[in-house]
Amino acid sequence: MIKFNFIILIYLITYIFLKIQCAGKLIHVDVKIKDDWEEKREFVYLKKVEIKDRFVVKVIEKTNNRYDGFNKNIEVYLRSIDLNLDKNMFEVEISDRSKYIPSDQLKKKILIEITNNEIIQNFLPGFEKMVLRNNNFIDNINCYETSILYKSGNNFSSVEENIENYKNKLLSSYWTEINLIGYKIELLEKQKVKYPKEELKSKIIENGNKISGRIEENKRKCFNCRVTQTKQWYNLLTGHYLCKKCGEYKNIYGKFRSKELWFMTKKDRNCSICDVIQTSQWHRYLKPGHYLCAACYKKQQRIKKSNKNTNADG
């Protein structure tokens, strides 16, 4: 027994060691947000914001692609990175043995939040932050630099990347217009000049609604029942997914769940044989969407077993 336990212990140590070796060790790299935004009117308000509050850098700690998408169920996997005030940089961990180069690793795992103008926060509660994702990072000897000005490359390898780039540019144009309006309001209020406040406010709200609609559109939805929250996503087609219930149903029956089943819960079930609505455990019946209670299921199993034995004796 002792020898057996010793063998298991050696096996576990070897397994952990090999796993660590394959994953590689974590190394630290410095990430800097370029100050090119200072020349842009729409970001002039950031100069009044304390350095530590201007930008919040977060990393996505879970790399499973079921959760790794633009604004798709990633909130619970984000961790904030502290700013090193002496260097004005963020220290981020990456793998030294990843198949991706450091700049690509950073692009995939980093999300940047930008503090919004106070005027915009007053007109649009809930828009305290702008969010940037999939930024480009440039190796600059001692650090990796990125910009908040939505710069991106011109070469794309697929139609999907072109579409994603278009969506990001569309979002950035909305944000640019909102910030410029906020800058205009700020200047007019300083000069104490009368201006169409309601008209400008309505423009900010209109663009805010466009941003909300774009973000809502980007959220992952079940291709069949359209739910946005589920414990697990199943791949269906490129860019389309099924929720846990629809995915399991399709795997078992080879077709989509009908609308009648979308909102059905265990409380709505009844046994297809005895019609009871409460049981210790439900079992799937031959017909999709039908169930057997525990008693009827056991009875059916006994009948099947008895018939099998009878046929064997015959």
Image (cartoon, rainbow, N blue to C red):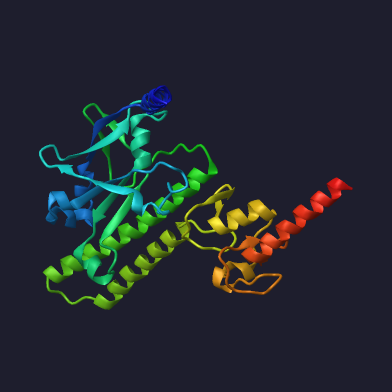
Q: Where residue 170 appears, x then y in whole percent?
A: 41, 55
Q: Where residue 60 appears, x then y in whole percent?
A: 34, 45
Horizontal side, residue 207 vs residue 83: left or right:
right
Query: Which image quarter is the N terminus in?
Result: top left
- Looking at the image, can residue 292 be seen? no
Q: Where residue 64 appears, x then y in whole percent?
A: 44, 42
Q: Where residue 85 appears, x then y in whole percent?
A: 12, 42
Residue placed most toward the observer, 121 or 297: 297
Res 281 quadrant in image: bottom right
Asked if 282 appears above or below 151 in the picture, the reply is below
Horizontal side, residue 300 vs residue 222: left or right:
right
Q: Which residue appears at 38% of the width and 68% of the height?
A: 209
Res 283 quadrant in image: bottom right
Horizontal side, residue 101 vs residue 286: left or right:
left
- Looking at the image, can residue 206 be seen? yes
Question: Which residue extends farthest left?
Answer: 86
